[in-house]
Image (tube, rainbow, N blue to C red):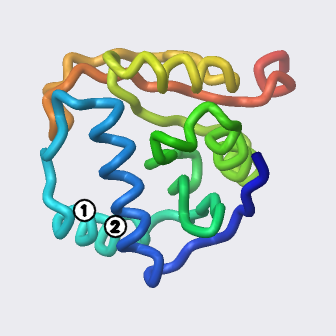
Amino acid sequence: MTVSLHRLGLQDMARVAVVLRQAFDERLPWLAGIHTPQEDRLFFENHVYASCEVWGALDADIVGFIAFREGWVDQLYVLPGYQNRGIGAVLLGAAKATWPTLQLWTFQKNMAARHFYEKHGFTAIRETDGRDNEEREPDILYLWQPQARLES
């Protein structure tokens, strides 16, 4: 599948929030509805767009996005109907091309995300019981750095 990759702005915020909510609720149904659409939009406006580059994969509309900043991937979501088509890898590639190392958090129960990140060179470096995240869900910290850095 061919999608185009574009940097997104605040004008895209409402659609990005919809992608987040649909993908999040599909992969983590036990946490579905934790935030309202209005709360999602405010989070993107006040936090994500204020601190991250946001890139989207477009196929007539936004079908996935990544939000990243120096050393971190804060968000990576692809609509359920577009998953397993290489879109997540293309989005992740934008962050990898920008920063020499990356870290990210995902929930321990999200086995699809864990498999995806491990397939793309991330290594689990820490697990928590979730007491420090909003969802109170056990999570896992991943690190990516190119092989050349690991061998030096």
* Residue at the image point whose x is 17% and y is 69% from the top: 38
**Hey, what amino acid is under mark 1?**
Asp
Name the residue carrying label 1: 40
Q: Quadrant of residue 150?
A: top right
Q: Nearer the viewer, residue 57 or 39?
A: 57
On screen, residue 144 versus residue 114, left or right, reads right
* Residue at the image point whose x is 16% and y is 35% from the top: 135
Name the residue carrying label 2: 44
Q: Do the residues bearing badges 1 and 2 touch, measured as CB atoms within 8 Å?
A: yes
* Residue at the image point whose x is 31% and y is 23% from the top: 139
- In the displayed structure, would residue 131 be above or below residue 10? above
Assign a secondary structure to mark 2.
helix
Does any portion of residue 49 appear in the rendered image? yes
> Farthest bottom residue?
11
**Residue 120 numbered tag:** none
- Residue 9: image location, x then y, percent: 52, 79
Q: What is the count of numbered marks?
A: 2
Q: Quadrant of residue 18?
A: bottom left
- In the displayed structure, would residue 90 be above or below residue 143? below
- Residue 6: image location, x then y, percent: 68, 69
- Residue 69: image location, x then y, percent: 54, 56
**Hey, what amino acid is under mark 2?**
Phe
On screen, residue 149 versus residue 61, left or right, reads right
- In the displayed structure, would residue 37 be above or below residue 114? below
At label 2, counting other C-alpha atoms closer than 10 Å, the crowd grade (few under 14, some 14-19, many 20 or more) is many
At label 1, counting other C-alpha atoms closer than 10 Å, the crowd grade (few under 14, some 14-19, many 20 or more) is some
